[in-house]
Image (cartoon, rainbow, N blue to C red):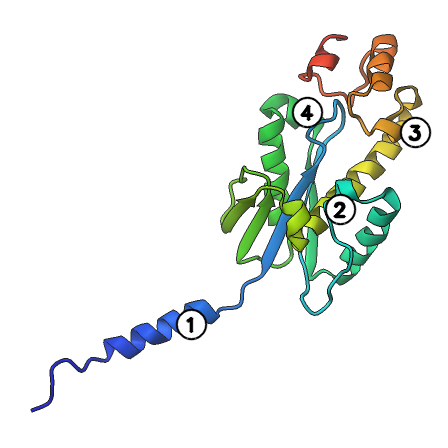
């Protein structure tokens, strides 16, 4: 008499488990630039790297020279499977607060990717609201290549924006301090007041309005 223990369920479960674990998934790295400055948008980038086209020299963008960042920016754009850069405006920063605006920029960057990632790794300890699996990694921009790549794209994009703003408002010195509250920037605010791209809810700007 055949045993009742034999069941078709077991091999089916094994097949399903194998299918889940063997499923290839794209990994996206996400980072931002511009949370601290007194002016300009906060910029976020999302990058899915191509394992078959490795990029040497990826690191936290703050640890690289401007020249290194520019070179890596071009290489990332050329070699990554896909990448996306997004931002939250000064108006959104003032309306939402800088943390929420940063999360919004990150969400936009991920949603702008041409390919949908299976998982998103975000630099820091906060996660934007996403419809995919996500993990926050403190100091991820120095340890996870995809996050390093995202930090470089975000930083270069924002620095270029600051150079353009400097051409419009040379009296503030945006090309040098990138919008951060340096002594030079604070002195310019006292003399010239705020320009339209200053964040009105940031204390040094609020003080001169």
Q: In this view, does 55 lie above or below 203?
A: below
Mark 1 Cα shell of 10 Å, populated few (<14), some (14-19), many (≥20): few
Rendered-image quadrant of the C terminus: top right
Mark 4 or mark 3: which comes first in sequence?
4
N-term mark: 1 or 3 = 1
Q: Which label number is shown at residue 152?
A: 2
Question: How far from the left and from the top, in percent, is residue 33?
Answer: 71, 37
Question: CA–CA distance between discs 4 and 3?
Answer: 21 Å
Cα–Cα gap, marks 4 and 1: 46 Å
Q: Is mark 3 on a helix, strand or loop?
A: helix
Closest to the camera, between mark 1 and mark 3, is 1
Query: Mark 4: which secondary structure?
Result: helix
For residue 188, what is the image quadrant?
Answer: top right
**First in residue order: circle 4 vs circle 1:** 1
Q: Residue at x 62, y 31 (%)?
A: 101
To which residue does mark 4 refer? 91
Instruction: Give how far apart the Cα atoms at labels 1 and 3 are.
Output: 56 Å
Q: Which of marks 4 and 3 is in front?
A: 3
- When asked about the image quadrant of residue 28, the answer is bottom right
User: Above or below — where is 68 with respect to 105?
Assistant: below
Residue under the image location 36 percent in, 76 percent down: 15
Q: Is residue 161 left or right of residue 94?
A: right
Identify the mark at residue 19; answer none if there is no mark: 1
Location of mark 3 (residue) = 167
- Classify residue 154 as left or right of residue 193: left
Between the residue at mark 3 and the residue at mark 2, the CA separation in whole angstroms equals 23 Å
Name which of mark 4 and mark 2 comes first in the sequence: 4
């Amino acid at each position: 008499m055949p045993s009742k223990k034999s069941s078709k369920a077991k091999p089916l479960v094994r097949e399903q488990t194998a299918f889940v674990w063997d499923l290839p998934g794209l990994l996206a790295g996400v980072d931002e630039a511009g949370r601290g400055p007194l002016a300009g948008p906060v910029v976020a980038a999302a990058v899915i790297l191509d394992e078959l086209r490795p990029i040497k020299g990826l690191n936290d963008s703050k640890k690289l020279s401007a020249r290194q960042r520019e070179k890596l920016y071009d290489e990332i754009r050329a070699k990554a499977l896909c990448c996306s850069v997004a931002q939250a405006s000064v108006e959104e920063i003032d309306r939402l607060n800088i943390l929420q605006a940063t999360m919004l920029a990150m969400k936009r960057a991920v949603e702008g990717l041409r390919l949908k990632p299976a998982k998103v790794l975000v630099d820091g300890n906060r996660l934007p609201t996403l419809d995919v699996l996500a993990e926050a990694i403190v100091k991820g921009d120095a340890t996870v290549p995809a996050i390093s790549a995202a930090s470089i794209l975000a930083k270069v994009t924002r620095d270029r924006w600051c150079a353009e703003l400097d051409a419009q408002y040379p009296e503030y010195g945006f090309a040098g301090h990138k919008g951060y509250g340096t002594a030079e920037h604070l002195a310019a605010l006292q003399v010239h007041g705020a320009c339209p791209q200053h964040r009105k809810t940031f204390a040094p700007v609020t003080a001169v309005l």
